[in-house]
Amino acid sequence: MQLRRSALALLLASLIAAPAASQDPAPERPPHYDHIPLWPNGAPGVGRRRGEAEVARDYWVRNIHDPSLIPFPAPAGKRNGAAIVVLPGGGHKLLVWTNEGTKVATALNRAGMTAFVLKYRLANEPGSAYTVEGDAADDARRAIRWVRAHAAEYGIDPTRVGMMGFSAGGELVTQVADHPEPAGRPRTDAIDSLSARPDFQVLVFPGPRGVPAPAPAIAAAPPAFLVAGSRDECCAAPTVALYEQLRRAGVSAELHMYADSGHAFNLDESERLSILHWPDRLYDWLADGGWLSPRPAKR
């Protein structure tokens, strides 16, 4: 009897000491991303707001005064030398950081592309003194220049650097790709001497700002892929209008308008099969344009 009690006591002690199988696991830490400041000494015009903390909740981030890039290098075994700067939307009030930023970057990685998600200044946030055509577009141009300046570090071909923008981010892509750079913008270092024009542009339900683009600039615009929903009240019409302007100017452009679909369907947020497969059409377009194929080194 005593032996049985001793065995029972040992069993109870071991159960108390061991972690319970049904115990909830420790909460995961939020993912850590490297932030690369676009201007090490602060963005032009940021003034006293430099260094203010960003505000982030769930899927969004705002209060951005130190614009930055977050790199997502493609796996070494898949890397093809192409790069793309991703600009999330959010009405220039916030950035839809996950669904139009980090998730997009990791999807592009699967195609062998190195992605950089841009945190740009927000012109429509309450209390903001920034402008879309000025400060936010400056951030977008600086992002392209920064990627070209550091191409060798990431195994990138500096002649295959594109931009991809969602909604308000698409407006910024249009400002950079289809409009001339305003004269008199400040030059802070050697990076600012590089070209800010992307080699290709991807516009995902882009907003109306900047459409139509100036005729002389649109003729020099890079190849474009445009996609939107036919029932998108804000962005269906400007998407079609920009495509038609590009087409008339002789720019290589491809347009996909999806029936009975509205705004912000992103990568996988729809019950419609056509919407779920729109990234496949993007990858087809990228492949047909040679953007996913490494180019031989020039001799």
Image: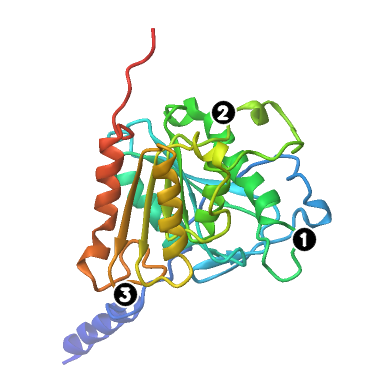
Nearer-the-camera pick, 189 or 186:
186
In the rendered structure, the answer to whether residue 224 lies left or right of residue 127 reads: left
Which amino acid does the dot numbered 1 rest on?
A: Ala
Number of other residues with Cα within 10 Å of mark 3, as a class: few under 14, some 14 to 19, many 20 or more:
few
Q: Which residue is mark 2?
A: 149
Q: Earlier in the sequence, mark 1 or mark 3?
A: 3
Which amino acid does the dot numbered 2 rest on?
A: Ala
Q: Which residue is mark 1?
A: 129
Asked which secondary structure carries label 2, the reply is helix
> Residue 145 sits in which quadrant?
top right
Q: Earlier in the sequence, mark 2 or mark 1?
A: 1
Q: Quadrant of the C terminus?
A: top left
> Residue 144 sits in which quadrant?
top right
Q: Is residue 34 at least partly visible in the picture?
A: no
Q: Which residue is mark 3?
A: 18
Q: Are marks 2 and 1 in contact (CB under 8 Å)?
A: no
- Residue 17 lies, with reference to residue 276, above or below; the image says below
Between label 2 and label 3, give the one nearer the viewer. Answer: 2
> Residue 157 sits in which quadrant?
top left
